[in-house]
Image (cartoon, rainbow, N blue to C red):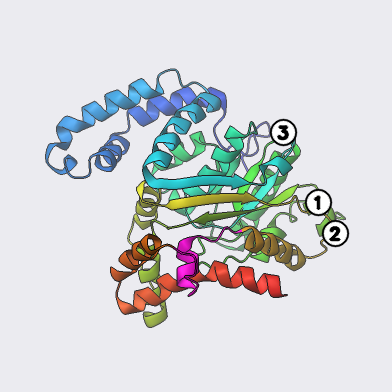
Amino acid sequence: MSENPQDPYADIRPYNDDEVGPVVVRLLGNAEFIDALTRFRFPLSSRWVGFLLRPLVRGVLKRELSGVDSIDTMQQVIASYMQRMIERTTGELSFSGLDRLEPDSAYLFISNHRDIAMDPAFVNWGLFHHGLQTVRIAIGDNLLRKPYVSDLMRLNKSFIVKRSAKGVREKLAALMELSSYINHSVHSGHSIWIAQREGRAKDGNDQTDPAILKMLHVSQKKGATFAEAVKKLNIVPVAISYEYDPCDAAKARELRALDAEGSYEKSQFEDIDSIARGITGYKGDVHVAFGEPVQGEFDTAEALAAEIDRQIHANYKLHSSNLIAAGDTAGVSADKQQQYQQRISELDEGARTWFERMYAYPVINQRTGMES
């Protein structure tokens, strides 16, 4: 934790309102950030006339961020970008279960994890348009290798999970700080979003890691049981489903490599590239299902994980891609089947197997849950 007793979470928390202005100035002056944004906005032209485009990009960004002096005003800017992204990259965007949430309550949303940036972004979009507070977002420090990326994420209410901690003592300190921060946030009226496991479920098999749930308890006073600690967190399982994952081909190739060779070496900025692809890539229909706030006594992390999994599997909206991959094409239009075949045809045979598996798993999990 921070050495400042007045601000014990300073090194991991999102930025406060009084920090927003200086951070925006720092971003506008960061040449690497402007260069990355130019390449993102003009992927072809930037190679040849980037020196002309960069001042233009900086000027547009400065105009868009003028007047941004708080987290709320920053979120309004982000909302305008979200609106454009939704119009360009999604079909139907739908939500369910928002009526179960109380406007004056804070929740710990635990969701399945498909996309680094878009999972919490779609959760926030639903909350925002339902008149509910947006969430503070857990993000691993492995994604924050560039200072400007860290600045951007913390401006958008992200807090840092120190996955890179080394040694037993450092890892324990990081775990305690994370646990304490999540509990402090929810108990002080700020909702939190975390994924049900570390990293994305690249194979489509959504399973909650009990270790994530045990982390929530470690910072509590001695004598507080696991059941007592988690009950106070107002846990709500969330199932996010994409008709198409913009990173599906890359995930399928990675899984094939892991299966065939036993290892897969990421490129230096592969996670950042995945974030960009997830934002700009085609998603088809998207549904976010907010489950029932978890009630009852759960004495172990394993029992709580089973309940979270039950809700996520049951509430997951199956799209045409899921049904086709599972061999259930009855009722799926010829256009949808052609769209699926076009995507899978671009992969070699080994990657196709994993592609189909990642889309079929939600069907398998849902039907297995219904039978049990």
Give the label on residue 297, or none.
2
Magenta segment: 316-332
Given this view, does label 2 or label 3 mark the residue nearer the observer?
Answer: 3
Crowd band around label 1 with a 10 angstrom C-alpha radius: few (<14), some (14–19), many (20+)? some
**Dot label at residue 231:** 1
Secondary structure under the numbered disc 1 in the rendered image: helix
Residue type at mark 2 is Glu
Residue sitting at x 51%, y 37%? 154
Q: In this rendering, is residue 364 above or below 236?
A: below
Q: Position of residue 360 (x, y in %)?
A: 50, 71
**Could you say which is closer to the camera, residue 366 or residue 301?**
366
Q: Position of residue 308 (x, y in %)?
A: 69, 60
Residue at image point 47% right, 54% down:
115
User: Of helix, strand and loop, which one carries label 2?
Assistant: loop
Q: Secondary structure at mark 3?
A: loop
In the picture, the quarter occupied by the N terminus is: top right
Q: State the image quarter where residue 211 is shown.
A: bottom right
Give neighbour class at mark 3: few <14, some 14-19, many 20+ (Cα, 10 Å).
Answer: few
Which residue is at 83% across, 63% downward?
A: 299
Query: Is residue 205 covered in magenta?
Result: no
Disc 2 to disc 1, C-alpha distance: 8 Å
* Res. 177 visible in picture: yes
Rendered-image quadrant of the C terminus: bottom right
> In this image, 246 relative to 79: left or right?
left
Above or below, 51 against 359 in this view is above
Q: Amino acid at mark 1?
A: Lys
Judge whether 353 appears above or below 220 on screen.
below
Dot placed on the residue nearer the N-terminal end, 3 or 1 = 3
**For mark 3, what is the residue?**
103
Residue at the right extreme of this rendering:
223
